[in-house]
Structures are given as structure tokens and as C-alpha cells.
């Protein structure tokens, strides 16, 4: 079987055992390899054969320098001893660290996943997969997330390059969603493999990863529009949960969270665009943003969206995210970057099929954010997280990789903390300090990615609409049925399932078959919908009544607390003011301070009739309103 998958699960198991750092995870691999291969000595000057043996045995391709780091750690642990030009195994320590038995167990767990995946494809889709095809699908899934962590590394992936089909990717994403709900044990095995994969990739940074690990305390974290959109639930609950927990983790570490004003405006433009297209007859799902598709799928009205827009700032505040202006470049001209060169690098990474004309505005704002961080940083090419000062977090791993390639020319071969990091990379750093917390975030992010991968993309929707238009033009379907295909998420979802996510499998026949299914089911739907809607409304009514009661009770409690503290503040302020006035007039009646106070008291007299109770009431009102807002957000 493909041993690389089982090896990734073993990396996670080694982390659970030792909990030291990412290098330590590979030390038992060396001990096991020494025992299996019967090495009597290892040449310090040339151990390329060991690298090849490691790949043959475990399926992971460790480059020369990271392997040298692992061997040096094995020496510190007493597994090998250095004498002149060779390392010599210490068999007592080798036997202690050998994990052959655990490797057999992990291989058995991977086999369980593979067999169940094959069975799932057969029973649900009547598709027969070989063991190799199933393993390749799993490995391809893992490699699709490589850049989340490796964008800042000088090395490539640990895994062998695997080519797979859109159909295979769709099948695996569907299977992952299935076992999450129906087979928790296999799902836990799968999450363990994914976690091991991310942890294993950190070895490709050699010793440099130690520099970037640490706390985000007092680091300025600037979030991109994609992060904000997912955090606030505009791409579904799965992403909202994952990003909410990551944001909470950053707040716990006392980082300072911001979005630039231009990022804020970018999200507002997206929301306003959704408001325009929500009920528009010209709506085209192939050109719609993910945010618009989400609002339509959730059945949101324009009034719902208006309310969402009106509370947008409050939502940011609830996560302690502040809106900040873009820095003035004229104040730090020495840190001005070559934005044209960065744009060229971004376009190169995005590839020839990227539509620059349609996405030019987005690229401009991304470049503006990266350039702004360069201006805010006090140190060029900072070597540690602590000295970096500011970081831009993005959900776009291609952008992070393009920025890294651009920055390499300035920082040469030195390791440094890039301006732009991915959300997964930041989560991995947090993991080093709180593994359990990161495991929860990572698991939810994986599921969110799987759900997202099962949604039709723009290429797929365009193919569906093109085929439906052929049917309309030939008179095979009506205008209403064409609109149903063009705008109906249900029909597009059915075609996604039927074609297994492959646009090349969509044709006029498949569109016709799905529409026929919709017609045949139409008679049954109203009665079913009535029963479901009635039950749902009854449950919602009960929940709403309970929620309203809780809100009323909380409001009463909050107002009571606000009144008490407002009185305390008002009386305290009046008391302090009176005390200051008395002291000044007793001990320095002719001083400048006494004169200023006389002027202030005159103004107060004009404004409030010099009524102490009136001033106290004014202070009370301000304190009461402010406390009410704070209590509403945080209690």
C-alpha cells in the first residue's frame, strides 16, 4: 500500500507522545529505519542513501538539510553516537524508539478508510475504485493543502506528486462529509492523517520554523476580505465556526486585530452588490460571488441583507476587530515596495487562466494591503514573530506564495517572517502552543473546505447554463425551465452530484434528466413542504418565545447594572469636580488654574444653568448609554 499516508498518521502519533517540537516527531522514524535496514554506521558527509531508504520505507521525501537536522536530534537523544566521520547506532536506544508495532496499527487504520471509501463509492454511485485510486484520491486531497503551510518554505512537498481527476476529488469530499456524520471513528483517523500532514510539512523549514513559532501577543494582525467574509458567516456556518475559533484564539493571545479601511470598503461593496442582485431578473449564477450564492441559498431577502449591513460594524466589534486607515506612504518612502513587480508575480502564480480584467480591483486591494504592512513594519525581513510587528493574514494561499517569491529577492536566502501569512499557517503556529485548540480549528476548517469543494464553481455553472441554453434554443425546454437551471441552486446541485463535479460530464442529456426529475417530484413536494414547514414553524415559534424571554431578562438585568454603575460614575465625577474646585479656591484663589476654572464654570452655567443636578444627569445619561452598548455586546 501507499505508506506515506500511514506515515503522516504516525507523525501525529509521535507528536501526541513526545510533544516537544516538530523535529522530535521524526526521531523515532530514524530509529525504526536503522533497525529495519540494519545500519552499522552512517557517513556524516554523505547520507543520501538513508534519504532514499527513508522514502522507500515511509513514503516521505525529506530533503538533505532537514534530514541532517533530524539526525543531529537523534544524536542528542542517544540513538546514534558520533565518532570521527560517522554516526554509529546505539541499539539499546534504537530499540526503545522503534515504532514498528504502531506503524502496523496505523497502516490498518488507513486500510479501513480506503476499504470504506471504496464501499461508499460502490453503494452510492455504483463506481468501482481500486485501492491505488482510493489512496491517490486521499493523497491528492492532502497535497491540495500543501501551499497553506509551505508557501514560505524553500522546499517542496514531502509527498510524491499525484495526478487525479475532478471526479475523484468530488467523491472523496463527499465521503469525508459522510463519515463525519456517520462514522466518527474513521473520521477521527482521517483528521489524524490531515493533522500529521500539516505537522510533517513544518520539517521542510529546517530550523527556521523555530523562529516563527511563539505568541502573537501585541502583534498587529490585519485580516483580508476573505477572512472577514468567512468569519462573519457569509460563506456558511462551517467556515464561520472555524474562523470564529481562530479569531478567538488570536484574541486570547492578546494580538491586535485590524482591517484596513480599503478592506472594509471592499467587503461593503460586495454586500451592496449582493443587495442589488438578490432579486434581480438579470441574476447570473455563473458570475455570482460566493457571498451572493450563500444569501440566495439561505433564502435571504433584501431587508435581511440591509439589517446585516447595518450591524456589520457591531459584528466586527464583537470580535475586537478595529477598522484602521491605510498608512501614508509618504511618511516611510524607504519602505516603498515595487508594486508593479509584485503584481507581475501574483499574476504569474495565478496562472494563464486567471481573468485579470475581472479581478483587477481585488488584486489592487491585496497589493495595497501588503504594501501597507511593509510601511508599518519597523524592521525589514524580521527574523522572529515578535520583531515582525505586523502581519497580513489571507485565506488566499496563492497570494501568500506570490508575496513570498517577491520578498525573497530582497531578503535573499535568509529566513524571515513574511508580510503575508495564510490562516492555516497561523493556526499551525498556535498549534505549537495549544494542540487541542488547534485540532478543533483545523478539523472545522477541513470540513468547511470539503463543503465548499462540493459547491459548483463558475466554470461548472457556465457549462450547465450553456447546455441549458442549447435546449431552450431548440425548443426542448421552456423559458421558465431555462431560468430554473440558470438560477436554481437545487438544479445545479443535482447536476453537480450527477456529474461528480466534472463539468466535462455535463451535457444536454444530463440537464434534461435533472429537469425531468424535478417535474416528477414536483407533485409530491407541496405536501411534504407543508408538513415540514408546519413542524419547522412550530419549533421556531417555541425557540423564538424562549429567545425573546431570555432577551427581555437579559435586557432588564443589563439596564439595572448600567443604572447602578452610571450613578456611581456620575456621583464620583461630581464629587471629584467639587473637591478640585474647593481645593483650588481655598489654596490658590488667584492662580491661573482658578481663572480657567472660573471660565469653565461660566460655560457650564450658560449650558446647564449651573445646576449640579443637571450636570450630574448629563454625566449619568452618557455613562448609562455607553454601559448599555458595552453590556449588549459582551454580556
Image (cartoon, rainbow, N blue to C red):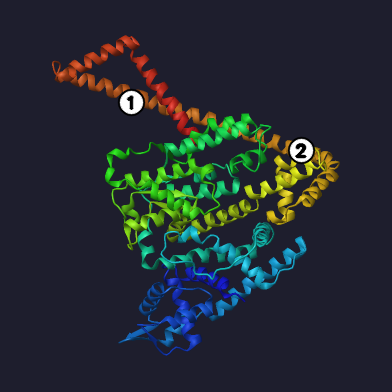
Can you give x and y, in whole percent of width and height, for residue 610 in the image? 31, 11
Query: Label 1 neighbourhood size at 10 Å, few (<14), some (14-19), many (20+)?
Result: few
Does any portion of residue 190 appear in the rendered image?
A: yes
Can you give x and y, in whole percent of width and height, for residue 337 in the image? 34, 47
The front one of 528 and 262 is 262
Can you give x and y, in whole percent of width and height, for residue 335 in the image? 30, 46
Which image quarter holds the N terminus? bottom right
* The image quarter in which residue 624 lies: top left
Query: Label 2 neighbourhood size at 10 Å, few (<14), some (14-19), many (20+)?
Result: few
Q: Residue lying at the far front in this picture: please name it.
A: 474
- Give the numbered dot on residue 572: 1
Residue at label 2? 533
Count of numbered badges drawn on the protein: 2
- In the rendered view, would you say 52 is above or below 189? below
The front one of 479 and 149 is 479
- In the rendered view, would you say 136 is above or below 582? below
Tell me the element at label 2. Answer: helix
Q: CA distance from mark 2 to mark 1?
A: 56 Å
Amino acid at each position: 500500500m501507499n505508506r506515506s499516508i500511514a506515515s503522516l498518521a504516525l507523525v501525529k502519533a509521535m507528536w501526541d507522545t513526545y510533544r516537544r517540537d516538530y523535529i522530535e516527531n521524526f526521531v523515532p522514524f530514524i530509529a525504526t529505519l536503522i533497525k529495519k535496514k540494519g545500519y552499522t554506521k552512517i557517513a556524516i558527509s554523505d547520507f543520501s542513501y538513508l534519504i532514499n531508504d527513508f522514502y522507500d520505507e515511509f513514503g516521505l521525501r525529506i530533503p538533505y538539510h532537514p534530514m541532517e537536522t533530524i539526525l543531529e536530534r537523534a544524536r542528542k537523544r542517544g540513538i546514534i553516537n558520533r565518532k570521527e566521520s560517522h554516526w554509529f547506532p546505539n541499539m539499546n536506544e534504537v530499540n526503545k524508539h522503534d515504532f514498528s508495532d504502531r506503524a502496523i496499527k496505523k497502516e490498518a487504520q488507513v486500510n479501513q478508510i480506503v476499504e470504506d471509501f471504496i464501499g461508499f463509492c460502490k453503494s452510492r454511485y455504483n463506481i468501482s475504485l481500486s485501492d491505488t485510486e482510493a489512496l491517490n484520491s486521499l493523497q491528492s486531497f492532502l497535497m491540495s493543502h500543501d501551499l497553506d503551510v509551505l508557501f514560505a518554505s524553500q522546499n517542496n512537498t514531502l509527498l510524491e506528486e499525484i495526478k487525479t481527476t475532478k471526479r475523484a476529488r468530488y467523491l472523496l469530499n463527499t465521503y469525508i462529509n459522510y463519515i463525519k456524520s456517520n462514522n466518527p471513528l474513521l473520521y477521527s483517523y482521517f483528521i489524524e492523517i490531515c493533522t500529521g500532514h500539516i505537522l510533517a510539512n513544518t520539517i521542510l523549514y529546517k530550523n527556521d520554523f523555530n523562529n516563527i513559532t511563539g505568541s502573537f501577543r501585541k502583534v498587529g494582525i490585519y485580516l483580508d476580505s476573505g477572512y472577514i467574509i468567512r468569519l462573519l458567516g457569509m460563506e456558511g456556518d462551517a467556515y464561520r465556526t472555524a474562523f470564529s475559533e481562530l479569531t478567538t484564539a488570536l484574541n486570547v493571545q492578546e494580538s491586535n486585530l485590524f482591517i484596513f479601511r480599503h478592506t472594509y470598503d471592499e467587503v461593503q461593496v460586495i454586500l451592496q452588490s449582493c443587495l442589488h442582485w438578490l432579486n434581480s431578473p438579470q441574476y447570473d449564477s455563473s458570475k455570482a460571488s460566493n457571498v451572493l450564492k450563500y444569501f440566495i441559498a439561505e433564502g435571504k431577502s433584501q431587508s435581511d441583507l440591509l439589517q446585516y449591513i447595518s450591524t456589520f460594524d457591531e459584528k466586527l466589534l464583537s470580535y475586537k476587530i478595529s477598522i484602521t486607515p491605510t498608512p501614508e506612504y509618504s511618511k516611510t518612502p524607504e519602505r516603498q515596495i515595487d508594486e508593479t513587480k509584485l503584481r507581475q508575480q501574483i499574476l504569474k502564480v495565478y496562472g494563464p487562466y486567471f481573468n485579470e480584467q475581472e479581478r483587477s480591483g481585488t488584486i489592487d486591494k491585496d497589493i495595497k494591503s501588503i504594501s501597507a504592512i511593509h510601511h508599518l513594519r519597523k524592521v525589514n525581513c524580521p527574523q522572529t514573530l515578535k520583531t515582525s510587528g505586523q502581519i497580513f493574514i489571507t485565506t488566499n494561499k496563492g497570494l501568500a506564495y506570490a508575496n513570498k517569491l517577491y520578498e525573497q529577492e530582497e531578503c535573499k536566502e535568509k529566513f524571515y517572517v513574511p508580510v503575508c501569512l495564510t490562516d492555516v499557517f497561523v493556526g499551525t503556529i498556535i498549534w505549537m502552543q495549544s494542540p487541542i485548540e488547534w485540532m478543533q480549528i483545523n478539523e472545522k476548517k477541513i470540513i468547511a473546505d470539503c463543503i465548499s469543494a462540493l459547491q459548483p464553481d463558475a466554470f461548472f455553472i457556465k457549462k450547465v447554463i450553456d447546455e441549458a441554453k442549447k435546449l431552450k434554443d431548440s425548443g426542448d425546454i421552456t423559458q421558465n425551465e431555462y431560468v430554473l437551471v440558470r438560477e436554481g441552486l437545487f438544479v445545479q446541485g443535482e447536476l453537480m452530484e450527477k456529474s461528480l463535479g466534472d463539468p466535462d460530464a455535463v451535457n444536454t442529456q444530463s440537464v434534461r434528466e435533472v429537469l425531468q426529475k424535478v417535474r416528477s417530484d414536483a407533485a409530491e413536494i407541496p405536501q411534504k413542504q407543508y408538513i415540514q414547514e408546519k413542524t419547522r414553524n412550530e419549533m421556531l415559534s417555541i425557540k423564538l418565545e424562549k429567545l425573546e424571554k431570555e432577551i427581555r431578562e437579559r435586557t432588564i438585568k443589563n439596564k439595572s447594572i448600567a443604572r447602578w454603575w452610571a450613578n456611581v460614575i456620575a456621583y464620583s465625577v461630581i464629587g471629584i469636580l467639587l473637591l478640585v474646585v474647593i481645593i483650588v479656591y481655598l489654596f490658590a484663589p488667584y492662580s491661573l488654574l482658578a481663572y480657567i476654572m472660573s471660565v469653565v464654570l461660566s460655560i457650564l452655567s450658560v449650558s446647564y444653568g449651573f445646576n449640579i443636578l443637571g450636570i450630574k444627569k448629563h454625566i449619568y445619561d452618557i455613562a448609562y448609554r455607553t454601559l448599555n452598548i458595552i453590556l449588549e455586546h459582551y454580556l
